[in-house]
Amino acid sequence: MVRRGGSVPELVAAARTGQVRAVARLVSMVEDASPLLREVMAGLAPYAGHAHVVGLTGAPGVGKSTTTSALVTQLRAAGKRVGVLAIDPSSPFSGGALLGDRVRMGDHALDQGVYIRSMAARGHLGGLSWATPQALRVLDAAGFDVIIVETVGVGQSEVEVAGLADSTVVLLAPGMGDGIQAAKAGILEIGDLYVVNKADREGADVVRRDLRGMLRLAERRAGAWDPPVLATVASRGDGLEELVTALDEHRAWLGESGEGERRRVRRAREEIEAIAVTELRRRWEHLGGRAELDGLAAEVAAGRTDPYAAADLLVAEAGGSSR
Amino acid sequence: MVRRGGSVPELVAAARTGQVRAVARLVSMVEDASPLLREVMAGLAPYAGHAHVVGLTGAPGVGKSTTTSALVTQLRAAGKRVGVLAIDPSSPFSGGALLGDRVRMGDHALDQGVYIRSMAARGHLGGLSWATPQALRVLDAAGFDVIIVETVGVGQSEVEVAGLADSTVVLLAPGMGDGIQAAKAGILEIGDLYVVNKADREGADVVRRDLRGMLRLAERRAGAWDPPVLATVASRGDGLEELVTALDEHRAWLGESGEGERRRVRRAREEIEAIAVTELRRRWEHLGGRAELDGLAAEVAAGRTDPYAAADLLVAEAGGSSR
């Protein structure tokens, strides 16, 4: 199948040799849910599974974009190829990103060893954009050594990042809320590494101490990873070398403990489920007749049927035939 | 079917007469995914659809719990029965809530016209706890006049609250980040009402003015609702009367414009889909053989198959037979 810029096998081959434009086209095909995606994913499947996927998350204002940018600089200095997926929940309904890729990380715009992409968190039942795990797969197969998934926000999205990433970095900063708030956000359960950014500001030591105290209280199994609490001033690159070292150590632990393999399988699981659910939802829109979703929703809203009975109809029709 | 506390029809009848313990038991059945849920939901279906569902959301630290509590007080003074579902993302993995219901809103603990429940945001593909729309249905059918759904966090969860609620209140406070942050979080697209809480603090006027400016820039269709920007000091009840009035006005608009019906249908849709997807996921765990999810995930992680081919197997098996 020939298209602008070549066939799918040609695109896959170009992405594999590190051509950023080919990578960008493949990610766009993911975002647009291109009918060619199946062919793309089948072509990429043998090459994925080698990247170190790093999730980076934290509340608004802690300096995630600055830290991501500084981390990219540090990894590039070590000769690593780096991909960045910035999950931007700014515009769930319009799908538009507030800040363009170039604006976000202008320092890396001309570096062929870096690929940066903002993706909308289109959410709905998909939570994190259903495209995210597939975009990760594209970057992974394209041979990026490290892929950083940056998410904005506090809450659900971190949990999902933790589900997708090999190593989850939780970013904090002084003055962003007390310990209870941190605990509320569930961050104590998802971080593999904690970073207190803006460490030159007042209160940074208190945040580190409190965080260490809370982490000590958390029960950990024997042989479990003990999350370090690092300090950075990302805006001037302080502490980034230590962060990269800690990420390398975590990755080594992932390999030795078998947890890395478990996380890769979990990521594949999320990916398969997201595709399957998306396909089912597409079918539910177009079933027609008694089993069509919108019609069922109107019946339920009017109290003429209950949601379980309606769901039964959808499930029965899901595979294309009755139970 | 007789159980502790009576049969399902008895429980439904007791909840309908306002017995808080019966309501609590029904919500627990939702949370525990009781096998009796189908019967419960079928029993409740004819009675739902009358409550005013108010979503209340905002970043950590803006005073959501305080505002919810003050709003309950105000609504009670007007003779309304009020249900509160506090979606707590504190502990997605353990499922535990950090702060118990009684601690959160001790002021209302003895009031039989108030029912407050913390629910874990168990998330995963379900995003907001899949139980939330069903718990809403229980409270709705039990005759609560207003149901407040409070969510912690910035990001995905707000969007989902906006999907569930008739009226979405976005809470802000001075000193919680600049306008760009607000826009990043997508709040300009989801609020039906905006409330600047802690309005006695420095900078509150600036937040209101900036917010009004940004809302003016947003394109709205003719006849669309124009979101008001209110000011409160929830800790002493200031501005709560105005908030209740604005909520009433929004509800009236929902009725006149037809938007209320559209939102109810959308809520039913979410509910049906969440149930159907949960049922499918349950089946996928237990399919066995080639179509079992965990096995497929391992194959995909190892690069032996691609996620689309794996998803095809799940979809084909979803309804219990081949495509």
Image (tube, coloured by chain):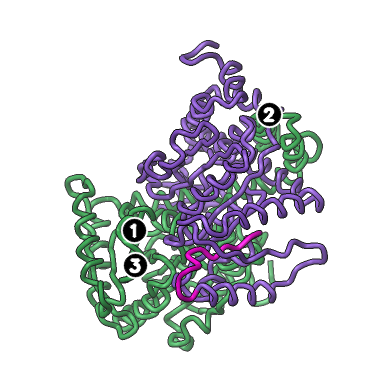
Chain colours: A green, B purple
User: In which quadrant of the rendered image does the C terminus of chain B lie?
Assistant: top right
Q: Do dots 1 and 3 share one subunit?
A: yes
Q: Residue A276 appears at what percent x and percent y?
A: 58, 46
Q: Secondary structure at mark 1?
A: helix
Question: Magenta part of the protein: which range?
Answer: B191-203
State the count of labels. 3
Give me the disc on residue A171: 3
Q: Nearer the viewer, residue A4 or A186?
A: A186
Give me the disc on residue A111: none
**Residue behind mark 1:** A182
**Residue behind mark 2:** B45
Q: Secondary structure at mark 3?
A: strand
Q: Secondary structure at mark 2?
A: helix
Q: Residue B120 appears at what percent x and percent y?
A: 44, 43
At x 66%, y 64%, the residue is: B228
Q: Quadrant of residue A70?
A: bottom left
Indicate whether A176 appears above or below B272.
below
* Residue type (three-letter) at the residue carrying disc 2: Ala
Examine the structure image and report whether residue A126 is included in the region drawn in magenta.
no
Indicate whether A44 appears above or below A296.
below
Q: Residue A298 appears at what percent x and percent y?
A: 76, 39
Q: Residue A10 appears at what percent x and percent y?
A: 58, 72
Position of B100 with respect to A41 (left or right) is: left
Specify whether residue A88 is in view.
Answer: yes
At x 61%, y 35%, the residue is: B144
Q: Nearer the viewer, residue A200 or B302?
A: A200
The secondary structure making up most of the magenta span is: loop
